[in-house]
Image: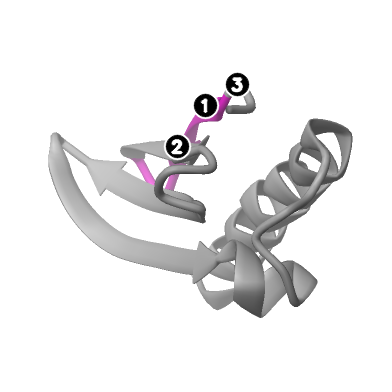
Amino acid sequence: MVQGLNTDFYLNGKHYHLQTEDWGSDKPYLVTRLYCQGAVLKTLKRSYNDIFGTVHISSDVVQVALKHQHEGFAKEFIAKK
């Protein structure tokens, strides 16, 4: 299992928390959630199979995908605001 990422940011006077985590090989998903005031605003859940075409993947590759998903989610959200 790869260590997750957390980012806090303010946008238009609101505090947001973005969290992306790897659920590991038993539950092979990368999950990103956007929170505002403790409430989940949006979730992105992608399986290893959808991302990589397999569930058997090295942790180094998972770490890169996790970072890419986290940063891409943030950029997309900010662009829409």
**70 on left or right of 42:** right
Residue at 78% from the left image edge and 50% from the top image edge: 57
Which quarter of the picture shows residue 19?
Answer: top left
How far, Cα to Cα, is label 3 from label 2?
A: 11 Å
The residue positioned 43% from the left and 43% from the top of the image is 26
For label 2, the SS is strand
Query: Mark 1 — residue?
Result: 6
Magenta span contains residue 67: no
Find disc 3 in the rendering and name its residue.
3
Q: Amino acid at mark 1?
A: Asn
Q: Nearer the viewer, residue 23 or 26?
A: 26
Kindly identify the residue that appears in the image at 19 percent across and 52 percent down. Answer: 40
Q: Nearer the viewer, mark 3 or mark 2?
A: 3
Closest to the camera, between mark 1 and mark 3, is: 3
The main secondary structure of the magenta stretch is strand
Sequence-wise, the earlier of marks 3 and 2 is: 3
* Label 1, label 3: how far apart the Cα atoms are: 10 Å
Which kind of residue does numbered mark 2 sit on?
A: Gln
Numbered range of the magenta stretch: 4-13
Element under disc 3: loop
Residue 7 belongs to magenta span: yes
Q: In the image, 60: left or right of 24? A: right
